[in-house]
């Protein structure tokens, strides 16, 4: 295991665990209290940062895969996720969490589409695609968790 892979794994586990703790804490707050609204906004802000972080990895992979065909498509997809990450926290916190949950699921779908070759192959390592898809689905579910407990 390389140092870069070890650092990426530790970062994913630490950020995912911290985000899970924040999502669970948010879901336990009083549904009608102002603390809940503030907690949902904070959760949406952290989720947006994580989405930008995950999308940014594709820019790095595209930059390092100098000979790969269609790496520009991965960069364009990453830009789309950056835009969602930038705009989502400006919305109502509940709406932002729904948008971010859908964005994480969409990113997982993009990860999966690399495997059969629907998206460029060879830009992103296959091990990263599987791990990232699982991570994205988990983060999307955690974004939606406080909204389930809101009703």
Image (tube, helix red, strand yellow):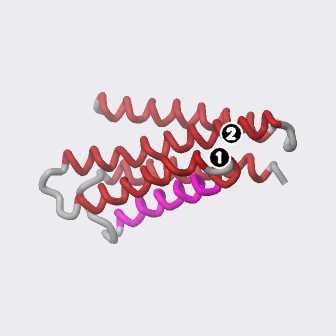
Q: Are marks 2 and 1 in contact (CB under 8 Å)?
A: yes
The residue closer to the viewer here, 50 or 21, is 50
Give residue 84's position: percent from left, percent from top: 49, 54
Question: Which residue occupies 51% across, 47% down?
Answer: 135
Secondary structure mostly seen in the magenta stretch: helix
Tell me if residue 138 can be seen. Answer: no
Residue 21 magenta:
no
- Which element type, helix, strand or loop, lies under badge 2? helix
Give residue 150's position: percent from left, percent from top: 81, 50
Give residue 70's position: percent from left, percent from top: 22, 64
Q: How many marks?
A: 2
Q: Could you tell whether 65 is left or right of 75 in the image? A: left
Please state, as top left, top right, bottom left or bottom right, where the N terminus lies in the image: top left
Quick one: which residue is furthest to the front in this view?
90
Question: Which residue occupies 61% across, 43% down?
Answer: 44
Distance in Å between CA atoms under marks 2 and 1? 6 Å
Please state, as top left, top right, bottom left or bottom right, where the C terminus lies in the image: bottom right
Q: Which residues are magenta?
A: 98-115
Question: Which residue occupies 66% across, 40% down?
Answer: 41
- 19 above or below 121? above
Tell me if residue 69 can be seen. Answer: yes
Q: Which residue is mark 1?
A: 142
Q: Which residue is mark 2?
A: 23
- Which element type, helix, strand or loop, lies under badge 1? helix
Q: Which mark is residue 36?
A: none
Question: Which residue occupies 37% across, 31% down?
Answer: 6
Quick one: which residue is furthest to the left in this view?
67
- 26 above or below 127? above
Q: Earlier in the sequence, mark 2 or mark 1?
A: 2
Q: Could you tell whether 70 is left or right of 80 in the image? A: left
């Amino acid at each position: 295991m390389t140092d870069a892979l070890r650092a990426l794994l530790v970062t994913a586990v630490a950020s995912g665990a911290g985000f899970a703790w924040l999502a669970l804490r948010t879901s336990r707050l009083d549904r009608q209290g102002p603390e809940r609204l503030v907690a949902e906004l904070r959760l949406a802000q952290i989720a947006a940062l994580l989405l930008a972080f995950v999308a940014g990895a594709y820019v790095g992979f595209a930059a390092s895969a100098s000979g790969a065909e269609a790496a520009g498509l991965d960069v364009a997809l990453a830009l789309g996720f950056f835009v969602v990450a930038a705009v989502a926290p400006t919305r109502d916190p509940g709406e932002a969490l729904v948008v971010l949950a859908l964005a994480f699921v969409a990113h997982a779908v993009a990860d999966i589409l690399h495997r059969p070759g629907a998206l460029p192959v060879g830009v992103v390592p296959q091990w990263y695609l599987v791990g990232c898809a699982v991570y994205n689905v988990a983060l999307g579910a955690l974004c939606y968790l406080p909204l389930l407990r809101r009703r």
